[in-house]
Image: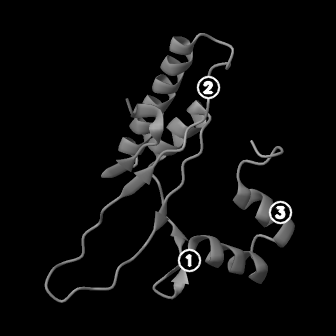
Amino acid sequence: SLASYDSVEAILEKHLGANSEGLKEVKRVMYGWNRGNEVSAMKLPTKATSMAKEGKFQIEGYEFKAAPEEMRAPRLVTIGAIQNAIVANTSAPFLEQRQAIYDRVTQLIEAAGEAGVDVLGLQEAWTK
């Protein structure tokens, strides 16, 4: 955690105020605008949020709406990204550390699947 906070957003909310104009401006700079509006959080399936709570990891979802097209109906594509952390003690044998990361990332992938993710980006945990 970040000095006992769950996220950078939690730190900003505490110090700038959860509904302040300052926080809105910081989020605009951090996340950008979506068609002239704030990027909005999306509702995640209960099973995915339960998995995150049980596994002690953070899961977030945000909606980015595209402009309507003339030739085709709107489509929903859910994209996910995983940022994992070291799980085992760094003094443990390498194979144990690697397996701990694989096990953890597997949990994260399963939660992403429960959240309906169509395309999932992984960091170097799975490269050879």
Is the residue marked by circle 3 packed among few (<14), some (14-19), or many (20+) residues within 10 Å? few
Q: Amino acid at mark 2?
A: Val
Q: Is residue 63 above or below residue 102?
A: below
Q: In the displayed structure, would residue 101 be above or below residue 41?
A: above
Image check: 19 left or right of 46?
right
Q: Residue furthest left?
A: 71
Q: Amino acid at mark 1?
A: Gly
Q: Position of residue 9 (x, y in %)?
A: 71, 61
Tell me which label, 1 or 2, sits earlier in the chain. 1
Res. 82 in view: yes
Secondary structure under badge 3? Answer: helix
- Who is closer to the viewer here, 94 or 2? 94
Left or right of residue 78: residue 75: left
Report if residue 116 is visible in the image.
Answer: no
Viewer-side label of 3, 2? 2
Q: Vertical placement of 118 versus 38: above or below?
A: above
C-alpha span from label 1 to label 3: 21 Å
Question: 10 Å neighbourhood of mark 2: few (<14), some, or many (≥20)?
Answer: some
Task: Measuring from the top left, give residue 87's x and y in whole percent.
Answer: 61, 25
Q: Quadrant of residue 4?
A: top right
Q: Quick one: which residue is furthest to the front in this view? A: 128
- The residue labelled by disc 1 is 32
Near mark 1 (Cα within 10 A), the count class, few <14, some 14-19 or many ≥20, is: some
44 above or below 14?
A: above
Q: Which residue is mark 3?
A: 14
Say which residue label 2 marks. 87
- Mark nearer the N terminus (1 vs 3): 3
- Residue at image coords 74%, 75%: 23
Quadrant for the N terminus, please: top right
Residue furthest to the top in view is 93
